Image (tube, helix red, strand yellow):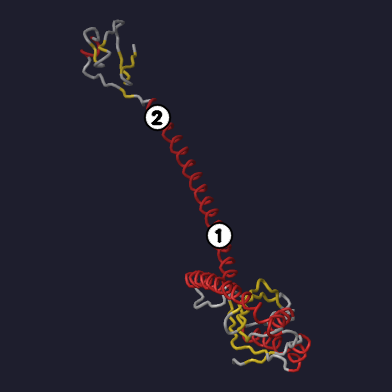
Amino acid sequence: MAFLLDNQFGLSTGDKFDCDLINHVPTHTCSAMEQDPNYVPIALPSFDGDMGLEAQEDTDEEDSSGTTTTTKKTKKDRSRTLISERRRRGRMKEKLYALRSLVPNITKMDKASIIGDAVLYVQELQMQATKLKADIASLESSLIGSDRYQGSSRNPKNLQNTSNNHPIRKKIIKMDVFQVEERGFYVRLACNNGEGVAASLYRALESLTSFIVQNSNLATTSEGFVLTFTLNVKESEQDMNLPNLKLWVTGALLNQGFELLTA
């Protein structure tokens, strides 16, 4: 009779079979095996081992699939983060250009200098506003006394005729032009103070039809006016560079009667 013990195949001639199942050895009745010196146990393959190998392969495949999914998700999240960061920097750059166009006394073109100059400019404006309020109050108090002595001797029409006979000379004291982008430029003009000067500056700016004016700011100083503005070149103008832009701005100012005192 054939029997299977611990995955081993054996032969037995008797019907009695009693083995120790815990130690996997016969106890006392396997006489055929005890007496036959040629007995050789035959080992059979373990089914549990094969099943464990297949289960391990399935687990490896699941782990590999999970790793691939996690890697793709990480790359996608990283791409979204980079795009969001680029957009944020672009918005900050645009706001920085707008701030730079509003501040007339920019010392350097880097971010820290622009913000620092803007803070100083705001503080200076606050001081000027306080001083102007004091001057206005002083003038209002002195106007009552001065009107008593002037009477009707000063004719406004005569004063207007005198000013027309001696027109104010419009002068460009300083002109700075910077290229901030591939088709973007920043211009700063400083000119003398006088009647009609500010209007002439804006007429010159409007005459630059080959450009798109992004923003502009006109400030007053003790010496005159300071006009700052940013321009973008239209698509129709292909060969526009920094020297050509200076020529365009200079021509527009000359057409409005300005004299250039700077090179």
Residue 50 percent coordinates (x, y): 40, 29
Label 1 Cα neighbours within 10 Å, binned few <14 / some 14-19 / many ≥20: few
Residue closest to the eye, 19 or 112: 112
Specify the quadrant that holds the C terminus.
bottom right
Answer whether residue 152 is visible to the viewer in this image. yes
Residue receiving disc 1 = 88
Q: Which of the numbered marks, if any, corresponds to residue 52?
A: 2
Residue 167 percent coordinates (x, y): 72, 91
Residue closest to the eye, 175 or 89: 175
Q: Secondary structure at mark 1?
A: helix
Amino acid type, callout 1: Arg
Q: Earlier in the sequence, mark 2 or mark 1?
A: 2
How many badges with numbers are in the image?
2
Amino acid type, callout 2: Gly
**Image point (73%, 84%), residue name:** 151
Q: CA distance from mark 2 to mark 1?
A: 54 Å
Q: Is residue 34 above or below residue 144?
A: above
> In the orientation shown, which residue stands out farthest toward the top?
16
Residue closest to the eye, 201 or 2: 201
Q: Is residue 3 above or below residue 178?
A: above
